[in-house]
Each structure stands twice: as structure tokens, then as C-alpha cells.
Image (spheres, helix red, strand yellow):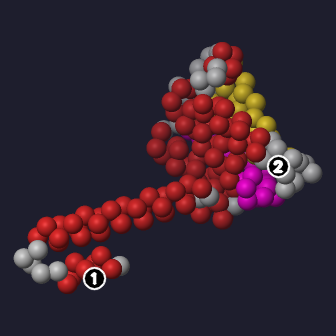
Amino acid sequence: MDVVWLQGHLEPQQPALLAKTQAMSKLIDTTVQVVRRISTELRPGILDLGLVATIEWQLQEFQTRTGIESILISPAAETTLNDNSSTAAFRILQEILTNVVRHAQATRLEVMLEENDKFLTLRVHDNGRGMTESEIQSPKSIGLLGMQERARLQAGEVHFQGRPGRGTTVTVRLPLVVAADGGSK
């Protein structure tokens, strides 16, 4: 970049200017890293391998990081969900996993992926403490509201069921075909 060129052409007697260009170079590098991270977060490149493969990878990472046994049950090798809905499903799964770590006190979780001719259903069940109805209904549950909004943007839905002492089940249903206006066809 031009900042690197400028650094190479500064005189050694200009330490303040040299320090300024080094700071500029660091800022540019940091900005590039942030842009790359944001781009990846918008649609992770691993989704190019397909939703099922991405979920398998995410669960392996999750299990390694947390020690929580994580199992994927999926009869199909891949789904027919479109890219936007696949991204939404993956982001919802990530939020579910975050909630399991933060709140569930679980040692095991199962992720079930089923597809029929109209819907993809993602069901996650943990063996943790179980969400209470007041937690599910709380307007302070930003993560739960975010999951519901992501699903709604794809004309889908999310349901939460907690059974105290027996875990929580989160069920996500997304239509396989979404109209341009966000409604299902």
C-alpha cells in the first residue's frame, strides 16, 4: 500500500512522521482484519460446503471447546434450503449453542435436522436444567428474540420448550421456498 511506500521513503531524521505512518499501517491492517471477520460472520464460507457439513463442523468445534457431547442426527446428506435460509439456520444454531453454554448446565445435546417437501426442521435438545416459561417469555431474552426474528425474516418460526431438570428443546422451522417479499410460496 502507499503507506508502506511512504515509510520506505521517509528520512531517518523524521521519527514523528515515521511513527505516524507505522500507526497508520497498523490501523489499516486492523481494519482489513475486521472487514474480513465481518464478511465471514455475514455468511461464513464454510456454508459453501452445505448446511449439514457446516453443522457437523460447528458441533465438533463446540464439543472440543466446551466438553459438551454434541450429536447430529440427519437422515439427509444435504438440505435444499436456499442460501439465505441456510445462513439463518446456522446463525440460529450458533445462538442456541451460546445459550446452552451460558445457561443450560448441559452435558449433552442432540441436533436433529429433518426435511420434508415444504419445511426444514432444526431441533436442538439439551439435557440441562430446562428453561422456565418466564425465561422464554421474558422481553429481556434478546438472544431468543433474535432467533425468532431471524426465522421470521425467512417466513419461519422458532419454538422453545423447557422442562425443568430435563432440558430444553428449541425447534426451528424454515420453509424450503421463500417468496421475494419474505412470505413462503
Task: State the residue lying farthest toward the left.
Answer: 13
Establish if 86 lies above or below 21: above
CA separation in Å, label 1 and label 2: 49 Å
Establish if 158 lies above or below 79: above
Residue hosting label 1: 5
> Which residue: 60% across, 56% down?
42
> Which residue: 35% across, 79% down?
1
Tell me where the magenta segment starts and ends, as one range.
69-86
Which quadrant of the view contains residue 97?
A: top right
Residue hosting label 2: 182
Residue 20 visible here? yes
Question: Depth check: 115 or 89 in front?
Answer: 89
Kindly identify the amino acid type of the residue bearing the numbered disc 1.
Trp
> Which residue: 64% across, 23% down?
139
> Which residue: 59% across, 20% down?
129
User: Residue 39: x percent and y percent?
Assistant: 55, 60
Which quadrant of the view contains residue 77?
A: bottom right
Give the secondary structure at mark 1. helix
Disc number at residue 125? none
Give the secondary structure at mark 2. loop
User: Residue 21: x percent and y percent?
Assistant: 24, 70
